[in-house]
Amino acid sequence: MSKIQVAKVNTLAAHQDCVYALAPGPQPHVFFSSGGDGVVAQWDLTNLEQAKMVAKVPNSVYALCYYSQRNALIVGQNFDGIHIIDLTEKKEKGSIKLGNAAIFDIKVMNDHIFCALGNGEVHVLDIATLQTLRVIKASDKSARCIAISPKNNELAVGFSDNYIRIYNLQTFSKKKEFEAHKISVFTVQYSPDERYLISGSRDAHLKIWEVNQSYELKQAIVAHMYAINHLVFSADGKHFVTCSMDKSIKVWDAATYQLLKVIDKARHAGHGTSVNKVLWSNFNNLLVSASDDRSISVWSINFNLSEE
């Protein structure tokens, strides 16, 4: 039987307000953060002593997305729009206003930017021209989270009306919708093999949906005490972590959905308030977490220990 060892590597006093967004960078050891102070910071996991400021915007940032094909960072500024930062040239390449709504999530695939907005819209834009290709309007409640399945050619969007809606990635037509949770869907992620969609909600439940069975519910888990804000898989796809408004991070077995570890303030000097976002780096299997307590924590997680 295996056991897990968790150790805090560092705590970064990175921002002057809540930290809401994390994104991977151009190299495995690089990541970006942003939050309520509008500062977009770049970090190096090999040297965490000092961050580089990439940009400063007037409003809160809930969503960041790095797009490797153009070495670009997309910044979602609430109540204004998105900014495209060319990391090679180290300058802004363009921006577009998307109305007066909050931007809760951003994903990019094949030069298409997908933005989930607080007014219930999903905007699809061309990254080169910033031309709006489609505006998907499915609800009067917020579009909170986005996941993309290239294998199934599908886009999954979680809404605050409790529904998950599935769209065709090419035509943007709606393929399916289903009431997934009792209240807002805060996070959706496809499993690495794209056989399952996992959702987390303000209702603190984790749900696993079978993609090839028309998104039939496979399993429901009462995973946290309060809202599940985000979830992310490890690089090898064998585990995933959830983070919550209950101040904890939980490590799960991706095959059995068994809870393996709880990372919190009492046991591991974790965050003191809501954990908003997690990023599982390919660099030394380090986990990064961002919180309302204005800090970023870096965690080492070791699965290769045998219990005596």
Image (tube, rainbow, N blue to C red):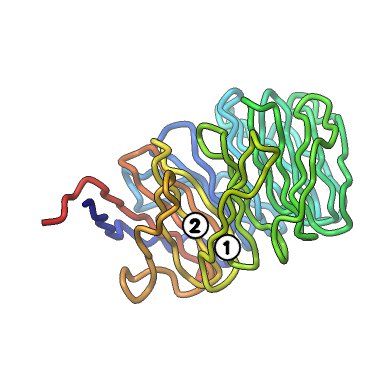
For image coordinates 87% across by 48% down, the residue present is 138
Rendered view: 16 above or below 47: below
**Precedes in sequence: disc 2 or disc 1:** 1
User: Is 213 placed left or right of 94 in the picture?
Assistant: left
Q: Which residue is mark 2?
A: 242
263 or 216: nearer the eye? 216
131 or 248: nearer the eye? 248
> Amino acid under label 1?
Ile
Q: Are marks 2 and 1 in contact (CB under 8 Å)?
A: yes
Rendered view: 96 above or below 127: below
Question: Picture coordinates of residue 288 (x, y %)?
Answer: 43, 52
**Residue furthest left as drawn:** 308
Q: The C terminus appears in which quarter of the rendering? A: bottom left
Question: Picture coordinates of residue 30 (x, y %)?
Answer: 43, 40
83 or 132: nearer the eye? 132
Q: Which residue is mark 1?
A: 228
Q: Residues within 10 Å of mark 1 (few under 14, many from 20)?
A: many
* Mark 2 vs mark 1, CA separation in Å: 7 Å
> Amino acid under label 2?
Thr
Q: Residues within 10 Å of mark 2 (few under 14, many from 20)?
A: many
For image coordinates 68% across by 59% down, the residue present is 60
Q: Quadrant of residue 65?
A: top right
User: Is 259 placed left or right of 268 in the picture?
Assistant: right
Q: Quadrant of residue 46?
A: top left
For image coordinates 26% across by 49% down, the residue present is 302
User: Is 79 placed left or right of 58 in the picture?
Assistant: right
Q: Quadrant of residue 203?
A: bottom right
For image coordinates 57% across by 40% down, the residue present is 196
Question: Picture coordinates of residue 41 (x, y %)?
Answer: 52, 49
Assign a secondary structure to mark 2.
Answer: strand
